[in-house]
Amino acid sequence: MKLKLFLVFFIALNAYAQNLSEILEALQKSNKTLSITQRTYSEIAQNELADTQEAPELGLSLSHADESTQDGLEYAVGISQNLAHPFSLSSKTDATDALTKAIRQKAKHELHILNLEVSSRYHSACISKEMRDGADLLYKEQSSRFNQLKRAYDLGEISKKSLLFNKLDLAKLQQKVASYKRSYLTELSYLQESIDNLTIDELVCTDLVEISRDIKLNSIEEHGEIKEITYQQNSAKSFYDVYNSSFKSLGYELLYEKELDKTRYTFGLSIPLGGATTQTQKQQAEYLHKNSSLLASKEALSCEIKNASKSLQLKVETLYDEYILLNQEILPMSLELRQLSKSALSEGEGTVMEYLDATRSYSENLLEMLRIKKNYYYELFELYKKADLDLGKES
């Protein structure tokens, strides 16, 4: 009956726990995501204005003529329009399209980094939860055994020094339990700050990324930030071609005039004398230097990403090796030693002190393994963000 009640309580408790997929799904509908997408749409609309022409203008004038032989109304109706870069429309469209792609790529990368940041916080909170639960269980077990140690002291089997030493050790473990509880609440709060449309009370933590040593990196040209700069370069080249045209603009005017005794049709054409100023050359120089700046920026960023990714790869590999050593060798041996000490104590062949020493060693190794695991996930997600990798990408 107690077991059934416990299971019902456990299920009810976890009914309010969120997994990573649910949190990321909520993130897609959050105000943070909405802010990024709406800003992107605004920037795209503003950019696409460059690929439009001014609307034609309609002019109308009325006048009353009073001459010696006749009088009446005279009027004129005209349409005029100024066409910007009429002979480089294709280049202007290419430049606008490339810049639109750059804006979209920037937003895509920003949202991807946001997803990875939330995933990183989720993993960090889950390991803090595991450390809290592990330390709490170890404290309860060690506290129970300490009561046996006090009885041994009362019987004169151990010294007061040994009793105080273990009491101090137990108090330190109790402090660690409190520290891990506080750490978990802090990590959970930190995760909650990222999601404004979901209340996170508890975490499932059964869906963590599988621990792996070798993380495969993509080609540098596939990196989101590098792709954005490439689009910006294409836009700058096309804008250079736009200003390389012979005519910056072309204006026309169609005019119909009705006077008292005559009708007049007028067609006008205006062409700016670009050669009379250096404006066109300055505009060409702007995009020429911009393209050079983007090229240098791309090379510098590529080098930075490669070096940082390599460094993070080495950290991940080192932490993985350390974690595997603790998890598969040191911790199992510590557990076996603790079990042997426990059996020896039960059979009267060992002492409480030996068992407590074995338990203390196991506790330290377990908590150290979890600390390494937490550091591993932190560096792993830093690698994901720096190298622009998808969640869970392995070799």
Image: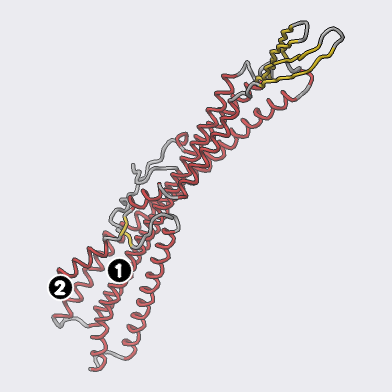
Residue that protrudes farthest toward the bottom in the picture: 155
Residue receiving disc 1: 134
Q: Residues within 10 Å of mark 2 (few under 14, many from 20)?
A: few
Figure check: 383 above or below 140: above
* Whole-number angstrom distance, CA of label 2 to CA of label 1: 23 Å
Q: Quadrant of residue 78 in the image?
A: top right
Residue receiving disc 2: 2
Figure check: 155 above or below 140: below
Residue 205 numbered mark, or none? none
User: Residue at position x 42%, y 63% from top?
Assistant: 189
Residue that protrudes farthest toward the top in the picture: 262
Figure check: 322 above or below 115: below
Q: Quadrant of the N terminus?
A: bottom left
Q: Quadrant of residue 111 in the image?
A: top left
Q: Amino acid at mark 2?
A: Lys
Nearest to the observer: residue 262 or residue 197: 262
Q: What element does badge 2 sit on? A: helix
User: Residue at position x 41%, y 38% from top?
Assistant: 218
Dot 2 and dot 1 residues touching (CB under 8 Å)? no
